[in-house]
């Protein structure tokens, strides 16, 4: 496969709404494989995105999203540990259900603008993904798996950062539902 560039993944990097729901429309079976859910020290980028102090711990949930058994997205969610006792307590019992069940069915939740970015080839996030990908799939992740997007969800004063890293297999594939979303916005009804 060729290089997965920002332009070849543009539709996925900018797609509004639930990524899980869009991925599920690509095949017969959509799965969320939880790779890790743990309390860890804050990372600088997460701390900045969440507006948190230098000290403290964050709860992270790292997952692999598969369609018909094929891994297509590695995702990492992070929030301050104190938010688990408040607005985001449902995250504790989420298990292998998509995070979308919490994020898009609650009108009190708002989302920041999507921020696409290219990960550093040897950065901490990419190293973590490579290790988990190998353990979960028995294969190496593509060297071209570099493009991600992140956004921050807010509810009741607490914030949750979600980073989604795309496999190059998605490059050039249309995001299902994009056309229907535009029609709904213009016409006000369902397509």
Image (tube, rainbow, N blue to C red):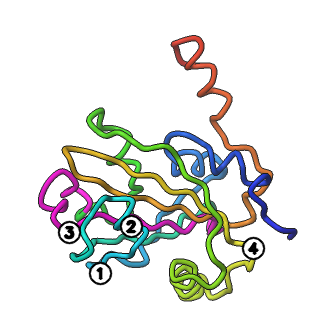
87 falls in the magenta region: yes
The residue that label 3 is drawn on is: 81
The residue singled out by tag 2 in the image is 46
Question: Which residue sits at x=39%, y=64%?
Answer: 77
Q: Which residue is mark 1?
A: 41
Q: In the rendered view, does 91 fall on the left or right side of 34? A: left
**Spatial CA span between label 2 and label 4:** 23 Å
Image marks 1 and 3: residues in contact by CB distance under 8 Å: no
Q: Residue furthest right?
A: 2
Q: How far apart are the two marked residues, 3 and 2, measured between alpha carbons?
A: 13 Å
Q: Nearer the viewer, residue 56 or 165?
A: 56
Q: Is residue 119 left or right of residue 76?
A: right
As helix, strand or loop, the secondary structure at mark 4 comes to loop
Q: Earlier in the sequence, mark 2 or mark 4?
A: 2
Residue 175 drawn at (x, y percent): 68, 43
Q: In this orientation, which residue lies closer to the viewer: 141 or 94?
A: 141
From what the image shows, is residue 89 above or below residue 14?
A: below
In this picture, residue 91 sits left or right of residue 175: left
Query: Which stretch appears magenta?
Result: 69-91
Q: Residue 37, image x and y in percent? A: 33, 75
Mark found first going from the N terminus, 3 or 2: 2
């Amino acid at each position: 496969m060729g290089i997965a560039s920002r332009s070849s993944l543009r539709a996925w990097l900018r797609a509004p709404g639930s990524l899980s729901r869009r991925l599920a429309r690509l095949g017969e079976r959509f799965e969320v494989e939880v790779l890790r859910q743990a309390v860890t020290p804050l990372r600088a980028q997460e701390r900045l995105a969440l507006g948190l102090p230098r000290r403290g711990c964050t709860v992270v949930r790292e997952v692999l999203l598969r369609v018909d058994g094929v891994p297509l997205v590695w995702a990492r969610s992070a929030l301050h540990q104190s938010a688990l006792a408040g607005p985001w307590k449902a995250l504790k019992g989420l298990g292998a259900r998509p995070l979308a069940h919490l994020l898009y069915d609650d009108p009190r939740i708002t989302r920041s603008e999507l921020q696409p970015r290219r990960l550093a080839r040897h950065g901490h996030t990419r190293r973590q993904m490579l290790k988990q990908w190998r353990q979960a799939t028995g294969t190496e992740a593509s060297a071209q798996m570099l493009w991600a997007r992140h956004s921050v969800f807010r509810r009741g004063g607490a914030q949750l950062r979600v980073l989604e890293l795309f496999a190059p297999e998605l490059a050039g594939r249309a995001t299902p539902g994009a056309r229907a979303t535009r029609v709904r916005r213009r016409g006000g009804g369902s397509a």
